[in-house]
Amino acid sequence: MTRRVWLPFGSPKDAADALGGIPDGIAVDCFRGAGDEPASIGEVELLVAPYLVPAARVLERRAEMTNLKAVLLQLAGYEDYVPLLPPGVQLCNAAGVHDTSTAELAMALALANLRHIDQYARNMPSGTWQADWSESLADKNVLIVGYGRIGHALERRLEPFEVRIARMAQTARVVDGREVHSIAALHDLLPYADVVFLLTPLTPATHHLIGPFELALMRDGALLVNTARGKVVDTNALVEHAASGRIRASLDVTDPEPLPPDHPLWRCPGVLISPHRGGASTAFTPRTNALMSAQLQAFADGRPLANVVAIG
């Protein structure tokens, strides 16, 4: 029996070339999320969502996808898709694809802020030689909030920097002999952290996880690095604390996003912003193609799909 899938490539040949072939029993149509739904909309069983196309656009015609069984994402975040899932349809995220790239950017954002790399870059057009005293990452207390796969990848990169690491996830556990605290310990650990990395998914429980009270708990001069989702942090409260210079922030994600040009967060001292580029690097394509290929083979074989995060 042939099973119909939609893949985000220009042609079935492009898909086969990128994925190292298409499994037997799989028929491919291409969908780029630009109003180009194939005529097989009533037959498609598995849809790979085009990268960075809004969920509402990808599933705009979901009522016509009467045979849909699964939606696969090329993103780690999946909150926008959950309310749109038709009943019984599985949603799989791209856990593992973005670990390396996002962990690298989190490190880069922390180091750039601590070592004033952003300021030195701004000095270059004027040829200003501004010598100052910056902070080392070494010897700092680091708190990783959201100790999943990306958190583990970040820890591996932090270890050579001679830091002290505390880990936090939704539930307490021990991973490879390392203690992971429950999120309930957040208020106890925040006052001791010099650098706080946010890597948690956005859920109702993590919306504004870092709000006015949590920011007030952070020690003076602490650095908040957010590569999770903008809404994990209360932006108004962050502006208040950053504008005074009490804490600093390196942000790959903001709320709202894109951040409007006149938003005060752009001009807060000690704030460094990148435009949500955590997974957007050369590490993305080979990893997402490998995951897509493995998922297609599992689907063709009738085996369970990996990374199921929700069912409609």
Image: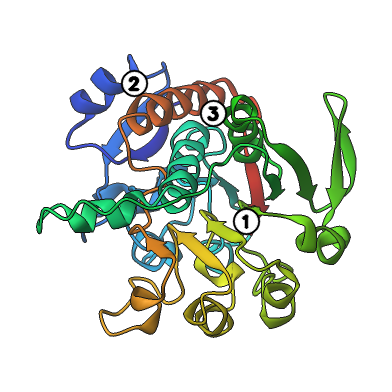
Element marked by disc 2: helix
Choose between 99 and 38: the one closer to the eye.
99
- Count the labels in the image: 3
The image's mark for residue 299 is: 3
Q: Disc 2 marks which amino acid?
A: Leu
Compared with residue 59, is residue 29 higher up or lower down, i.e. above or below?
Answer: above
Q: Residue 107: image x %, image y %?
A: 49, 41
Q: Disc 3 marks which amino acid?
A: Phe
Q: Disc 1 marks which amino acid?
A: Pro
Q: Tell me if mark 3 has few (under 14), some (14-19) or many (20+) residues whose alpha carbon lies within 10 angstroms of its own.
A: many
Mark closer to the observer (3, 2): 2
The image's mark for residue 146 is: none
Q: Residue 235: image x %, image y %?
A: 52, 79
Choose between 47 and 167: the one closer to the eye.
167
Position of the C terminus by quadrant: bottom right
Mark closer to the observer (3, 1): 1
The residue at which mark 2 appears reads as: 19
* Comes first in the chain, label 3 or label 2: 2
The residue at which mark 1 appears reads as: 201
Compared with residue 109, is residue 150 higher up or lower down, i.e. above or below?
Answer: above
Whether residue 101 appears in this view of the structure is yes
Element marked by disc 1: loop
Is 113 positioned to the left or the right of 137 in the image? left
- Which residue sits at x=54%, y=44%? 93
Is 23 positioned to the left or the right of 39 in the image? right
For marks 3 and 2, give the CA distance.
14 Å
Residue 96 sits in which quadrant?
top right
Q: Tell me if mark 1 has few (under 14), some (14-19) or many (20+) residues whose alpha carbon lies within 10 angstroms of its own.
A: some
- Which residue sits at x=62%, y=61%? 222
For marks 1 and 2, give the CA distance.
28 Å
